[in-house]
Amino acid sequence: MKLTVIGNNGPYPKAGGACSGYLLEEKDTKILIDCGNGVLSALLNICDAEELDAVLLSHLHSDHMSDILILKYAIGIKKSKGKFSGSIPLYLPMEDEDLVNRLNYNDAFKLIPINEEEGLNINGLEIEFKEMQHSVKTYAIKVKNKDKVFVYSADTSYNEGLVEFADEADFFLCESGILENDKNENSNHLTPAEAGIIATKAKAKRLVLTHFSPEYRLDKIMNEAKESYDSVIELSEAMKTYFI
Ligand SMILES: [Zn+2]
Ligand SMILES: [Zn+2]
Protein backbone atom coordinates (compact mmCIF):
# COMPACT_ATOMS: atom_id res chain seq x y z
CA MET A 1 0.00 0.00 0.00
CA LYS A 2 1.03 3.58 -0.29
CA LEU A 3 -0.24 6.48 1.75
CA THR A 4 -0.06 10.09 0.64
CA VAL A 5 -0.59 12.69 3.33
CA ILE A 6 -2.82 15.26 1.68
CA GLY A 7 -3.23 17.42 4.78
CA ASN A 8 -1.94 17.06 8.34
CA ASN A 9 -3.12 20.13 10.24
CA GLY A 10 -5.92 20.53 12.74
CA PRO A 11 -8.13 22.10 13.87
CA TYR A 12 -7.21 24.74 11.29
CA PRO A 13 -4.45 24.80 8.67
CA LYS A 14 -1.20 26.68 8.57
CA ALA A 15 -0.76 29.11 5.65
CA GLY A 16 -0.96 27.03 2.47
CA GLY A 17 -1.74 23.89 4.47
CA ALA A 18 -4.69 21.54 4.70
CA CYS A 19 -6.41 19.70 7.53
CA SER A 20 -6.75 15.93 7.79
CA GLY A 21 -6.79 13.96 4.55
CA TYR A 22 -4.90 10.78 3.63
CA LEU A 23 -5.01 8.94 0.31
CA LEU A 24 -4.41 5.21 0.65
CA GLU A 25 -3.66 3.38 -2.59
CA GLU A 26 -3.07 -0.22 -3.56
CA LYS A 27 -2.71 -0.86 -7.28
CA ASP A 28 -5.65 1.03 -8.85
CA THR A 29 -7.67 1.27 -5.65
CA LYS A 30 -7.89 4.71 -4.07
CA ILE A 31 -9.41 5.30 -0.65
CA LEU A 32 -9.56 8.78 0.84
CA ILE A 33 -9.45 8.79 4.63
CA ASP A 34 -10.86 12.04 6.04
CA CYS A 35 -11.49 15.10 3.93
CA GLY A 36 -10.79 18.27 5.90
CA ASN A 37 -10.52 21.78 4.55
CA GLY A 38 -7.98 22.18 1.77
CA VAL A 39 -7.92 18.47 0.97
CA LEU A 40 -9.82 18.52 -2.34
CA SER A 41 -7.59 21.14 -3.94
CA ALA A 42 -4.43 19.22 -3.00
CA LEU A 43 -5.95 15.83 -3.89
CA LEU A 44 -6.64 17.01 -7.44
CA ASN A 45 -2.87 17.20 -7.96
CA ILE A 46 -2.86 13.40 -7.64
CA CYS A 47 -6.11 12.11 -9.10
CA ASP A 48 -9.57 13.12 -10.23
CA ALA A 49 -12.30 13.11 -7.61
CA GLU A 50 -14.31 10.46 -9.42
CA GLU A 51 -11.36 8.03 -9.32
CA LEU A 52 -11.92 7.48 -5.60
CA ASP A 53 -13.21 3.99 -4.79
CA ALA A 54 -14.42 5.10 -1.36
CA VAL A 55 -14.16 7.84 1.23
CA LEU A 56 -13.93 7.04 4.94
CA LEU A 57 -14.63 9.77 7.49
CA SER A 58 -13.32 9.06 10.99
CA HIS A 59 -15.69 11.67 12.44
CA LEU A 60 -17.66 14.75 11.53
CA HIS A 61 -15.53 17.54 12.97
CA SER A 62 -14.97 20.20 10.33
CA ASP A 63 -11.20 19.66 10.11
CA HIS A 64 -11.92 16.07 9.01
CA MET A 65 -14.93 16.51 6.74
CA SER A 66 -15.50 20.08 5.51
CA ASP A 67 -14.25 19.44 1.97
CA ILE A 68 -16.85 16.68 1.55
CA LEU A 69 -19.25 19.62 1.18
CA ILE A 70 -17.25 20.66 -1.90
CA LEU A 71 -16.26 17.21 -3.17
CA LYS A 72 -19.99 16.57 -3.56
CA TYR A 73 -20.10 19.33 -6.20
CA ALA A 74 -16.99 18.05 -8.02
CA ILE A 75 -18.62 14.63 -8.38
CA GLY A 76 -22.25 15.70 -8.69
CA ILE A 77 -21.51 18.14 -11.52
CA LYS A 78 -19.48 15.55 -13.46
CA LYS A 79 -22.50 13.25 -13.13
CA SER A 80 -24.85 15.88 -14.51
CA LYS A 81 -22.52 16.39 -17.49
CA GLY A 82 -22.39 12.65 -18.17
CA LYS A 83 -18.68 12.40 -17.28
CA PHE A 84 -19.28 10.05 -14.36
CA SER A 85 -22.04 7.70 -13.33
CA GLY A 86 -22.69 6.04 -10.04
CA SER A 87 -22.12 7.19 -6.48
CA ILE A 88 -18.91 6.99 -4.46
CA PRO A 89 -19.34 5.01 -1.21
CA LEU A 90 -18.92 7.36 1.75
CA TYR A 91 -18.54 5.61 5.12
CA LEU A 92 -19.11 7.80 8.14
CA PRO A 93 -20.66 8.08 11.61
CA MET A 94 -24.22 9.26 10.95
CA GLU A 95 -25.31 10.57 14.37
CA ASP A 96 -25.50 14.23 13.29
CA GLU A 97 -28.58 14.07 11.07
CA ASP A 98 -28.62 17.76 10.11
CA LEU A 99 -25.02 17.65 8.93
CA VAL A 100 -25.39 14.28 7.18
CA ASN A 101 -28.32 15.74 5.23
CA ARG A 102 -26.00 18.40 3.77
CA LEU A 103 -23.30 16.02 2.57
CA ASN A 104 -24.83 14.86 -0.68
CA TYR A 105 -25.49 16.51 -4.01
CA ASN A 106 -26.89 14.79 -7.08
CA ASP A 107 -26.23 11.44 -5.37
CA ALA A 108 -22.47 12.04 -5.55
CA PHE A 109 -22.13 9.70 -2.60
CA LYS A 110 -23.74 6.56 -1.31
CA LEU A 111 -23.84 7.29 2.44
CA ILE A 112 -23.10 4.23 4.56
CA PRO A 113 -22.96 4.32 8.38
CA ILE A 114 -19.78 2.90 9.90
CA ASN A 115 -20.53 -0.28 11.79
CA GLU A 116 -17.78 -1.26 14.20
CA GLU A 117 -19.03 -4.86 14.27
CA GLU A 118 -18.74 -5.32 10.52
CA GLY A 119 -15.52 -4.66 8.67
CA LEU A 120 -15.37 -3.82 5.00
CA ASN A 121 -13.55 -5.27 2.08
CA ILE A 122 -12.74 -2.82 -0.69
CA ASN A 123 -11.04 -4.51 -3.63
CA GLY A 124 -9.23 -6.91 -1.31
CA LEU A 125 -8.30 -4.32 1.33
CA GLU A 126 -9.71 -5.37 4.70
CA ILE A 127 -10.93 -2.42 6.74
CA GLU A 128 -11.84 -2.33 10.44
CA PHE A 129 -13.13 0.43 12.70
CA LYS A 130 -12.77 0.98 16.44
CA GLU A 131 -14.64 3.65 18.38
CA MET A 132 -12.36 6.16 20.07
CA GLN A 133 -12.86 8.70 22.89
CA HIS A 134 -13.58 12.11 21.40
CA SER A 135 -16.29 14.76 21.75
CA VAL A 136 -18.31 13.23 18.88
CA LYS A 137 -18.60 9.65 17.58
CA THR A 138 -15.16 8.88 16.18
CA TYR A 139 -13.55 5.77 14.72
CA ALA A 140 -9.93 4.75 14.39
CA ILE A 141 -9.38 2.97 11.08
CA LYS A 142 -7.30 -0.11 10.24
CA VAL A 143 -6.51 -1.28 6.71
CA LYS A 144 -4.92 -4.67 6.08
CA ASN A 145 -3.41 -5.76 2.80
CA LYS A 146 -1.92 -9.26 2.86
CA ASP A 147 0.53 -9.12 5.80
CA LYS A 148 0.74 -5.32 6.05
CA VAL A 149 -1.30 -3.32 8.53
CA PHE A 150 -1.99 0.41 8.52
CA VAL A 151 -3.68 2.04 11.53
CA TYR A 152 -4.95 5.61 11.82
CA SER A 153 -5.86 6.87 15.28
CA ALA A 154 -8.30 9.58 14.14
CA ASP A 155 -8.85 12.09 17.00
CA THR A 156 -9.00 10.70 20.52
CA SER A 157 -7.94 11.02 24.11
CA TYR A 158 -5.69 8.31 25.49
CA ASN A 159 -7.37 4.91 25.62
CA GLU A 160 -6.21 1.32 25.86
CA GLY A 161 -8.57 0.40 23.02
CA LEU A 162 -6.24 2.19 20.63
CA VAL A 163 -3.25 0.25 22.00
CA GLU A 164 -5.10 -2.97 21.22
CA PHE A 165 -6.24 -1.75 17.81
CA ALA A 166 -2.73 -0.63 16.77
CA ASP A 167 -1.18 -3.96 17.84
CA GLU A 168 1.98 -4.58 15.80
CA ALA A 169 0.86 -2.16 13.08
CA ASP A 170 3.41 -1.78 10.32
CA PHE A 171 2.47 1.88 10.01
CA PHE A 172 0.76 3.75 12.83
CA LEU A 173 -0.47 7.21 11.85
CA CYS A 174 -1.29 8.85 15.13
CA GLU A 175 -2.66 12.25 15.97
CA SER A 176 -0.72 14.46 18.37
CA GLY A 177 -3.02 17.44 18.46
CA ILE A 178 -2.14 18.89 21.85
CA LEU A 179 1.04 19.58 23.77
CA GLU A 180 1.45 18.59 27.41
CA ASN A 181 1.18 22.18 28.70
CA ASP A 182 -2.25 22.68 27.13
CA LYS A 183 -3.67 19.38 28.34
CA ASN A 184 -6.51 19.32 30.87
CA GLU A 185 -9.28 16.94 31.87
CA ASN A 186 -11.43 18.15 28.96
CA SER A 187 -8.77 17.58 26.30
CA ASN A 188 -9.88 15.07 23.73
CA HIS A 189 -6.64 14.81 21.81
CA LEU A 190 -3.42 12.90 22.30
CA THR A 191 -0.16 14.54 23.28
CA PRO A 192 2.94 13.46 21.33
CA ALA A 193 4.12 11.61 24.45
CA GLU A 194 0.82 9.71 24.66
CA ALA A 195 1.11 8.82 20.97
CA GLY A 196 4.58 7.45 21.77
CA ILE A 197 3.27 5.44 24.73
CA ILE A 198 0.52 3.92 22.61
CA ALA A 199 2.99 3.05 19.82
CA THR A 200 5.39 1.50 22.34
CA LYS A 201 2.73 -0.57 24.09
CA ALA A 202 1.26 -1.66 20.75
CA LYS A 203 4.73 -2.57 19.42
CA ALA A 204 3.94 -0.53 16.31
CA LYS A 205 6.75 -0.84 13.81
CA ARG A 206 6.59 2.71 12.50
CA LEU A 207 5.11 5.77 14.19
CA VAL A 208 4.17 8.77 12.09
CA LEU A 209 2.63 11.71 13.93
CA THR A 210 -0.01 13.96 12.43
CA HIS A 211 -2.80 16.49 13.18
CA PHE A 212 -0.45 19.37 13.90
CA SER A 213 -1.79 22.59 15.35
CA PRO A 214 -0.31 25.69 13.70
CA GLU A 215 -0.02 27.02 17.27
CA TYR A 216 2.85 24.61 17.95
CA ARG A 217 6.39 24.33 16.69
CA LEU A 218 7.13 20.95 15.12
CA ASP A 219 10.36 20.50 17.09
CA LYS A 220 8.38 20.73 20.34
CA ILE A 221 6.04 18.00 19.09
CA MET A 222 9.03 15.84 18.19
CA ASN A 223 10.74 16.42 21.56
CA GLU A 224 7.65 15.42 23.54
CA ALA A 225 7.20 12.26 21.47
CA LYS A 226 10.83 11.24 22.01
CA GLU A 227 10.18 11.05 25.77
CA SER A 228 8.12 7.93 25.33
CA TYR A 229 9.13 6.23 22.08
CA ASP A 230 12.62 4.86 21.60
CA SER A 231 12.42 4.04 17.93
CA VAL A 232 12.40 6.47 15.00
CA ILE A 233 9.58 9.01 15.15
CA GLU A 234 8.43 10.74 11.99
CA LEU A 235 6.35 13.86 11.59
CA SER A 236 3.99 13.50 8.65
CA GLU A 237 4.68 15.80 5.73
CA ALA A 238 1.95 17.11 3.46
CA MET A 239 2.02 15.65 -0.06
CA LYS A 240 4.64 13.08 0.91
CA THR A 241 3.99 9.46 -0.07
CA TYR A 242 4.84 6.66 2.36
CA PHE A 243 5.10 2.99 1.44
CA ILE A 244 3.59 0.39 3.74
ZN1 LIG B 1 -9.24 17.04 14.30
ZN1 LIG C 1 -12.00 15.93 16.13
Image (spheres, helix red, strand yellow):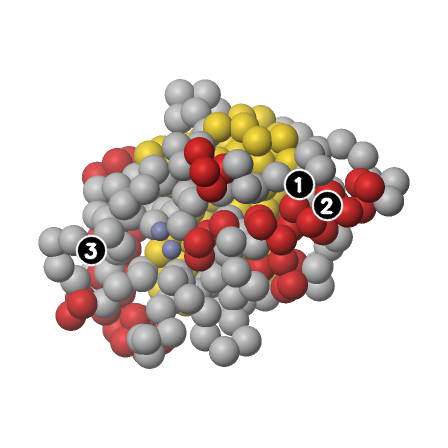
Q: Are marks 2 and 1 in contact (CB under 8 Å)?
A: yes
Q: For the residue carrying disc 1, how many other residues have a C-alpha within 10 Å: few (<14), some (14-19), or many (20+)? A: some
Q: Is mark 1 within 8 Å of ligand 2?
A: no
Res 63 quadrant in image: bottom left
Look at the numbered disc 3 and give the secondary structure of its residue. loop
Q: Residue furthest top?
A: 117
Q: Is residue 110 above or below residue 244?
A: above
> Foreground: 199 or 32?
32
Dot 3 or dot 2: first in sequence order is 2
Q: Nearer the viewer, residue 171 or 72?
A: 72
In the displayed structure, would residue 159 be above or below residue 40?
above
Q: Residue at x 55, y 42 (%)?
A: 102
- Relative side of 180 to 23, left or right: left
| Sooner in the amino-acid sequence: mark 3 or mark 1 | 1
Residue 142 in view in this figure = no
Residue assigned mark 1: 105
How would you rate the neighbour count of disc 3 (Cα within 10 Å): few for under 14, some for 14-19, many for 20 or more? Answer: some
Query: Which secondary structure lies at badge 1?
Result: loop
Decide if residue 155 is on the left or right side of residue 14: left
The outermost residue toward the front is 98
**SS for dot 2:** helix
Residue position for label 2: 75
Using a 10 Å C-alpha cutoff, classify the residue at mark 2 as few (fewer than 14 neighbours), some (14 to 19) or many (20 or more): many
Q: Which residue is mark 3?
A: 187
Whole-percent x, y for residue 110 in the image: 63, 31
Query: In x, y percent, where is residue 175?
Result: 35, 56
- Three-letter code for the amino acid on which mark 1 is drawn: Tyr
Residue at mark 2 to residue at mark 1: CA–CA distance: 8 Å
Q: Position of residue 99 (x, y in %)?
A: 47, 41
